[in-house]
């Protein structure tokens, strides 16, 4: 059975819907490319500044702890990705999980920004948590 007949669409309606879907896919692709470019730039700037920032906040911090701070984003992302995927599949909505992810990432970035306001000895752990939140947001 022809799919056009199966869905009750005439050939002109089918082509019109197909054209709209193709147009949406192109827009979504370009939005994704732009977001990934910004994320790549952010990471290249971000990672080069983490060590001096961490050392300024807590001079007694070790290079090993820097490894954990950098890994925290990946750990957060690996925790959040299946959660967001499940949420997407259950709600059939991309907007809600993406909005939640951006919100969590923004909260993580704001905490990272405000680290100088925290006590010196706890700032390293707060940075670790902020990086984990940022990773969860990108999940």
Image (cartoon, rainbow, N blue to C red):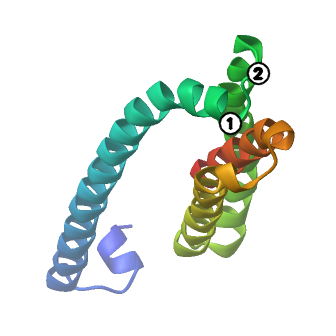
**Could you tell me which secondary element the residue under label 1 belongs to?**
helix
- Callout 2 touching callout 1 (CB < 8 Å): yes
* Quarter residue 48 falls in: top left
Residue at the image point whose x is 52% and y is 73% from the top: 95
Q: Mark 2 — residue?
A: 61
Circle 2 residues within 10 Å: few <14, some 14–19, many ≥20: some
Which sits in the foreground, 127 or 7? 127
Distance CA(mark 2)–CA(mark 1): 9 Å
Where does residue 29 sit, x and y in percent of width and height?
28, 54
Eyeballing the image, is 5 above or below 132?
A: below
* Quarter residue 79 falls in: top right
Which sits in the foreground, 107 or 93? 107
Q: Mark 1 — residue?
A: 57
Where does residue 108 sit, x and y in percent of width and height?
65, 55
Residue at the image point whose x is 35% and y is 52% from the top: 35
Label placed on residue 82: none
Eyeballing the image, is 68 above or below 129?
A: above
Circle 1 residues within 10 Å: few <14, some 14–19, many ≥20: many
Residue at the image point whose x is 23% and y is 78% from the top: 14
**Could you tell me which secondary element the residue under label 2 belongs to?**
loop
Relative side of 10 to 135, left or right: left
Relative side of 90 to 99, left or right: right
In the rendered image, the residue lying farthest to the left is 12
Where does residue 120 sit, x and y in percent of width and height?
79, 40
Relative side of 129 to 18, left or right: right
Where does residue 139 sit, x and y in percent of width and height?
62, 48
Which sits in the foreground, 94 or 55? 55
Count the marks: 2
Residue at the image point whose x is 70% and y is 51% from the top: 133
Q: Quarter of the image containing the N terminus?
A: bottom left
């Amino acid at each position: 059975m022809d799919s056009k007949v199966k869905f009750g669409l005439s050939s002109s309606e089918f082509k019109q819907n197909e054209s709209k879907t193709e147009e949406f896919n192109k827009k979504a692709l370009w939005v994704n490319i732009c977001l990934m470019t910004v994320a790549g730039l952010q990471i290249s700037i971000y990672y080069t500044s983490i060590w001096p920032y961490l050392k300024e906040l807590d001079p007694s911090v070790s290079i090993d702890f820097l490894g954990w701070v950098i890994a925290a984003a990946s750990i957060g992302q690996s925790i959040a990705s299946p959660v967001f995927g499940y949420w997407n599949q259950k709600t059939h909505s991309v907007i809600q999980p993406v909005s939640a992810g951006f919100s969590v990432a923004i909260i993580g970035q704001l905490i990272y920004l405000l680290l100088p306001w925290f006590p010196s000895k706890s700032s390293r752990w707060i940075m670790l948590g902020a990086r984990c939140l940022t990773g969860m947001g990108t999940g």
